Amino acid sequence: MTALEKGITANGTGYGGKSWNILGQVYFPKAVTDSTFAFETNSDPGQFVPVHIHPTQDEFILVQEGTLDLKLDGQWVKAHAGDLVRMPRGIPHGYFNKSDKPCRALFWVSPMQKLETLFNQLHNLTDPAEVVRISALHEVDFLPPEAND
């Protein structure tokens, strides 16, 4: 079991100095334990993560800067700086930066399950089909592309 270590993960850095580049988006792990996995995303205009499901995890997003458009259980919603998005396990969701400004957000997922391992394997991959395939092996199931409409 991974215990929570006390301390501060500084702004613009990842826990243990780690970061991931997943299809052009930069992710910084902020806290990693068996019970929770927190990471920061930095999404440039036009970047997104397609609609997917975490069947075994609850997920939250705290928008820190900018605006995210989310497809949440089939409905489009907007989350602005300071808003908290709640996504219970099994609910289809995807996030999209449709604005003309970068967006920074803190995500956390509980329990962690296989997400840190997944992010490690996705780091620097460039083939979206391979990202989808590997994600399915780690309890993240992407929906068909039309779910993003």
Image: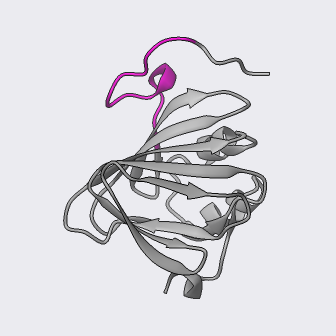
Placement of the N terminus among the 4 image quadrants: top right
Residue that appears at 67% across and 67% down: 91
- Furthest-left residue in view? 100
Q: Is residue 120 visible?
A: yes
Give coordinates of residue 147: x percent, y percent: 58, 83
Task: Tell me where residue 46 appears, x and y as whole percent.
Answer: 31, 69
Height in image: 115 above or below 100? above
| Residue 126 picture location, percent across and down | 49, 60
Left/right placement of residue 142 relative to residue 123 reads: right
Looking at the rendering, the stretch of residues picked out in magenta corresponds to: 6-20
Left/right placement of residue 101 relative to residue 124 reads left
Q: Nearer the viewer, residue 24 or 58?
A: 58
- Figure quadrant of residue 55: bottom right
**Most common SS among magenta residues:** loop
| Relative depth, front residue between 9 and 18 | 9
Q: Residue at x 58, y 81 (%)?
A: 74
Which sits in the foreground, 80 or 11?
80
